[in-house]
Each structure stands twice: as C-alpha cells, then as structure tokens.
Image (tube, helix red, strand yellow):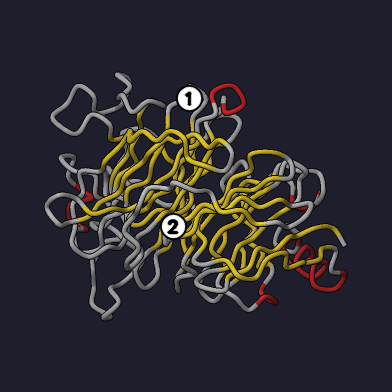
Amino acid sequence: MKNILPFIIFASVNLFSFYKLDTLIDDLNYPWGMTFISENTLLITELPGKIKRINLKTYEVTEIKNVKKVLFRGQGGLSGITLHPEYEENGWIYISYSASTETGENTLFVDRIKIENDYVSKQENIFKASALRTPPVHFGAKMAFLKDNSLLITSGDGFDYRESAQKLDNHFGKIIRIKDNGDIPSDNPFFYTLGLKDIFSYGHRNMQGLVVLSDGTIVEHEHGPRGGDEINFIRPGKNYGWPAITYGIDYSGALISPFKKMEGMEQPIHYWTPSIAPSGMMFYEGDKFPLWKNSFFISALVPGDVRRIKISKDNEITEEILFSELNARIRNIIESPKGEIYLITDKSNAKLIKVSPN
C-alpha cells in the first residue's frame, strides 16, 4: 500500500480537477522574481531591469521608477526579490541582479531598496560576488532570510568556472550568508579560516530554489547539466560536490566526473535525470488546498510544469506533476497570504497565472 498513495493522489488531481488556472496578465517581459508586499499587492521583477507592482484586485500594473540599471544579457538581469522579515517596520526590500564591473566583466550583486510612491527612494549595495566572469550565465541569484534576520544568497558557478565551486577563495558555486546590512556574521562556518568569511556552503552549480522552513531547515535546488538537477538540505560548512560528483553529464555528452558519491561530500535528497530545469520553489502552508499542505512546489522550465514534492520524516520522496496543461516554461511560483498560488511563465509575453480551488 505504501507505493499506491502517490498514484491515488495523482489520479484524483487529473480526474476531478479541484483547482482552476486563471491568466491575470499576459504581457510580462522576462519575469523572474516575485514577492507579496500586502495581501493583494505583488511585486514582480523583470530581467531587463524593471519592477512591476501588481494590484490583484484590479489587475492594474504599475512600473516602479528609478530602478538601477542592470546587465540584461544571457541569463543576467534583475532577478530575485524578497522582503526583510521586519519589512512592515523598516520598509527594506532586497533585490539581486547582474551588472558589469569596472573591468568589463560581470558578477552578482545584492542591494536593499525602499520604495515610496512607486519610486525607489533609497538603494544600498550590500553584496558583490567575488565571481567575476565574462559569459553572463549561472548567477544563482536566489535569496532567503533566516530566523536571525541574516540573509542567504545563492551564487552560481558561472558555467565556465565550475572547478572554482570547490575552492573557498571565491563565490562561484556558493551559498552566502550575510547580515541584513551586508556585514558578515562571526558564526559563519569559514569566518576564522583562510576562505571567504561569508561562505555558508559550497560545491553548488546554479541554484534557483531556496526556502527556509519555519523550523529553520534550509532547502535548495539547483540545475544540473544534462541530468543531475538536485534538491539538497543545506547545512553550514558542507560541500555539495559539484563538479567532483554529479548525476549529470556535460551538454556535449562528455563525462564531467566518473563519481556520483565521494567521502566528505553531501548527497542530494532527490535528483532528476533527465533534467527538468528547476527554476523556483515554495513550501505550501496554506489552507486553500488541504491535500497540498506542507509540500514543496518546484517550477520547471523543461518540459514545462510544476513538481509537487512531499518529503517524509525518513526523507522518502513523493512527486506529482501539476499544471502541465499550461504547455509553458514555468519560471517561478509563490504562495499568497491568502493561501492561493501564483505562477509566472518565462521569456517575453509571459503570464501571471493564479491557481485557486475549483
């Protein structure tokens, strides 16, 4: 009976369609990040360097003015957006983006901003990745706050710099932990070593899902090459193996590593081969969909769907494919304060889609 349950859940979704999908907006331009600033107000970033405020009662779209110029090229642009845990008191919003440096290379930046009257009234840079690159790809760029108000930032391997993910003198393939003002916490795992003091974990590829649960558990997912997309529990100071170990192969078909496991390197709790290109993640805690409560939802670019993942106490995985009827690359997914689910699709003429009970 243990193996029948996932099938029953999957069948009930498809036979009875207890959800409905409503397209609210269909002209977003390379949307990437989302965050709610109130029950009915959603902020969406667009890679070309725009922040859109969406009124979910009227569907009015307002562009925020005075947003800093970013590097919109390759996979780069204005990416992540998240609120400070005390946003209601301090008004800080955190954004991640790629930008050129004075040397002509590019890297990942994180700023904190304040928005007043649909205008960026204050902007402070709090992080610049020591990960200078020429090709504008594999930035990571996801953010999440811990309970102590410190900020986690994913910094991808830059594609051409994957070997650097195993070295502690750079930010390629790392998860970073800083204070909300950019200072470095002294309890970081490498604070008193020769490595960069803000590194929290290493050996990652291109991490585009990051969730912190109410008990403090940190869950991350990352793109593999051809196969080897991963979900990981993140622990401070741990090495997640890339590229020394991987379940994927190179895009050319060549072997990246002969090893899938190695002593001193963490194993994923789940991986996909072939790749699904995981692009965003949320942990659903609402009441609108009781069957889905306490599940991870992972948006996927290939073939274009959402994966609902249930992880048992024994780390057993149940996976369900949702929303494939959209026939679209899903860029990101978020839960609203009301317990509804919102999706954004990828590229130009992208859609904001609401998932609600049928």
Foreground residue among 258 and 280: 280
User: What amino acid type is highlighted by mark number 2?
Assistant: Glu
Residue under the point 23% across and 68% down: 256
**Residue 92 placement (x, y as % from top left):** 50, 31
Foreground residue among 153 and 255: 153
Q: Mark 2 — residue?
A: 230
Residue under the point 45% across and 36% down: 113
Residue under the point 40% across and 53% down: 207
User: What amino acid type is highlighted by mark number 1?
Assistant: Asn
Q: How far apart are marks 2 and 1 (CA)?
A: 26 Å
175 left or right of 24 in image: left
**Residue 264 placement (x, y as % from top left):** 27, 42
199 left or right of 315 in image: left
55 left or right of 33 in image: right
Q: Mark 1 — residue?
A: 149
Q: Earlier in the sequence, mark 2 or mark 1?
A: 1
Foreground residue among 268 and 125: 125
**Residue 62 placement (x, y as % from top left):** 61, 53
Residue under the point 32% across and 68% down: 74
Label 2 CA crowd tier, 10 Å (few <14, some 14–19, many 20+): many
203 left or right of 296 in image: left
Residue at the top extreme of this rendering: 186
